[in-house]
Image: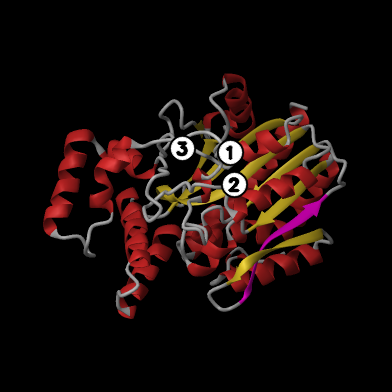
Amino acid sequence: MIGVSEAFSTSYAKARVQFLEAAVIAGLQIESHSHPLAGAEDETLAMDVARDGAMDAEKLLIISSACHGIEGYCGSGVQVFALHDAEWLQKARDAGVAVLYVHALNPYGFSFGRRVTHENVDLNRNFIDFSQPLPTNPAYDEVQHLILPDTWPPKADVQKTIDDYIAQRGQKAWQAAVGQGQYQHPEGVFFGGQAPTWSNQTIRKVLRTHGAHARHIAWIDVHTGLGPNGYGERIFTGPNDAAMLARARRWWDGHGATPVTSLDDGSSSSPPLTGLLWNSALQECPLAQFTGIAMEYGTVPVLETTGAIRADHWVHNHPEAPGSQRELIHQRMRAAFYDDSDAWKGMIISQARQAMFQAVDGLCTDS
């Protein structure tokens, strides 16, 4: 059994090695989908997939990491710990539930310490129908010049305008304007893209292969950056469907101890979003009953998180920025999405493990 802190890595390259080694030790089948670019350390980038269970299993649990690249520090730790957890592995096997570990949905962002893909796209806004007119976000258009001003840090007048906006309309309104997803500003934050990204196309291929025989699919996608430090909010992932939400709550709410929130009813720390990852499961595995959550672990206050994202995009758009400023912004991003303390890691693992056990029980009860 690996120690909790030992499951977490200090770089994408090390996290990938740990994941692949753990999968081999657990005796799992592994497939790697190579990314077209090299990583920050000139390492190979890939979306690595390890499967525990028969290909024709009717019940499938997906556990994924690094949809938002830098958040992979957390998600990879969850996956590595799970692969060393004999009790967990036996639990799923005895229940006849196949488990698919998808390591680094967005390996580029993981390696370079960014949330976005190499296309500068927020992957969790990229799953829309690009044959239709792109969604609009007038609220974002209104504040784009404040989100990414000409200079960084923002001048006092810019910050005052943001403060006034929040004072008049509320923090949630600011968060929604910034984070909902937008498709008209490629250089901006939370850009959903204007075509499917490499990661979008690759996870669809994985789902078509591994979900072909599944009749019941559960998905736990690990995220960080919203909510109280160390708390794992279980956010329902799916369409505005009362029966699907009720099923997720039966599985994961722990009789009220671990409530499942929803973007649609305002109970989540996240505002409503467009182009979410779960769409891929419904589209690529239409014969399967789908039930999913995002495990969203808190790190720092939300305005610090959005501030770090803004700074990261600003420096990406300004290649002339000095190296010292780049390093400070990189450190700020890491702190916003990963807490390196043993206490935080312990909370992450215990809550993820609980959610995984709940998912297996749910799959067996409702299938």
For residue 7: magenta? no
| Of the two numbered discs 3 and 2 in the rendering, the one whose residue sits closer to the viewer | 3
- The chief SS type of the magenta part is strand
In this orientation, does residue 358 appear? no
Q: CA distance from mark 3 to mark 1?
A: 26 Å
Residue at left 68%, top 32%? 290
* Mark 1 surroundings within 10 Å by alpha-carbon count, few (fewer than 14), some (14 through 19), many (20 or more): many
Q: Residue 4, relative to residue 236: is it above or below? A: below
Q: Which residue is mark 1?
A: 293
Q: Quadrant of residue 282?
A: top right
Looking at the rendered structure, the secondary structure element under dot 2 is strand
User: Horizontal placement of 81 versus 334: left or right?
Assistant: right
User: Which of these two is toward me, 62 or 148?
Assistant: 148
Q: Are discs 2 and 1 less than 8 Å apart at CB? A: yes
Distance in Å between CA atoms under marks 3 and 2 = 25 Å
Q: Which residue is mark 2?
A: 221
**Amino acid, disc 1:** Ile
Find residue 134 and name its label. Answer: 3
Q: Among all residues in the image, which is located at the extreme top?
A: 242
Identify the residue shown where x is 82% and y is 59%: 28
Amino acid at circle 2: Asp
45 inside magenta stretch: yes
Q: Which residues are magenta?
A: 43-52
- Residue 98 in the image: state x and y as whole percent: 80, 45
Picture colour scheme: secondary structure
Q: For the N terminus, give its image quadrant.
A: bottom right
* Residue 136 drawn at (x, y percent): 39, 36
